[in-house]
Image: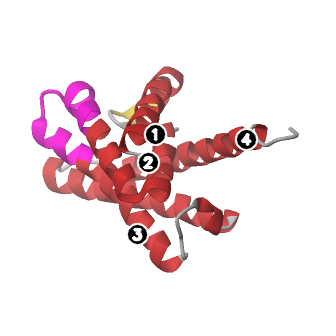
């Protein structure tokens, strides 16, 4: 499951770069961010294995592409990218009674997970930005990151549902 997560997340990063690079607000902050959907889906489906796969690819991406000259920021970026969805997974297990598959969640519960993740990830990242970088305009970039994560997550969830529907017998 670690390898499956790594492949899915790497593919989502590549596709996002091709399709939505022009919608980038700042380095690593996009108005539509498809990899956010993979982050949530991987942890909801694969738990710790998903978080580990996300961590490994996030570190590769951050160290090699986003922040090659800032190892502290690359390390933190990779870590935060995998911790936020894992925390949402833990919350879903506790408060939404998530079992071994997403089938135990209603569409509303999946939406709750998407909203929670779309807030948790930018919140963790922006706490880091405030403490480490002292950035200005944190509220604006938080809003963009939250919206981008939400839009990317919803797009990926709808795409996944569509693919699952096509793969059903008799369709």
Say which label, 3 or 1, has the lower sequence index. 1
What's the distance in space between the residues labelled 3 and 2, CA to CA?
14 Å
Say which label, 2 or 4, has the lower sequence index. 2
Q: Position of residue 120 (x, y in %)?
A: 40, 61
Secondary element type, mark 1: helix
The label number, if any, that marks residue 35 in the structure image: 1
Q: Which residue is mark 4?
A: 162
Q: Which residue is mark 3?
A: 90
What's the distance in space between the residues labelled 4 and 3, CA to CA?
27 Å
Q: Is 4 displayed left or right of 160 in the figure?
A: left
Q: Position of residue 100 (x, y in %)?
A: 52, 65
Q: Position of residue 56 (x, y in %)?
A: 27, 40
Say which label, 4 or 1, has the lower sequence index. 1
Q: Are marks 4 and 3 in contact (CB under 8 Å)?
A: no
Q: Which of label 4 and label 1 is nearer to you? A: 4
Q: Nearer the viewer, residue 27 or 41?
A: 41
Q: Residues within 10 Å of mark 1 (few under 14, many from 20)?
A: many
């Amino acid at each position: 499951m670690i390898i499956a997560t790594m492949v899915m997340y790497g593919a989502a990063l590549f596709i996002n770069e091709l399709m939505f690079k022009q919608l980038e607000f700042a380095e690593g902050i996009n108005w539509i961010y498809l990899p956010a959907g993979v982050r949530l889906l991987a942890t909801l489906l694969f738990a710790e294995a998903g978080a580990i796969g996300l961590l490994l690819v996030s570190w590769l991406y951050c160290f090699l592409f986003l922040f090659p000259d800032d190892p502290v920021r690359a390390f933190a970026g990779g870590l935060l990218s995998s911790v936020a969805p894992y925390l949402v997974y833990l919350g879903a297990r506790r408060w939404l009674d998530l079992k071994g598959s997403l089938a135990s969640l209603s569409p509303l519960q999946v939406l709750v997970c998407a909203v929670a993740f779309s807030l948790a990830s930018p919140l963790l990242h922006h706490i880091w930005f405030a403490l480490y970088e002292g950035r200005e305009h944190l509220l604006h970039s938080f809003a963009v990151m939250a919206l981008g994560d939400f839009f990317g997550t919803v797009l990926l969830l709808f795409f996944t549902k569509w693919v699952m529907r096509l793969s059903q017998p008799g369709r």
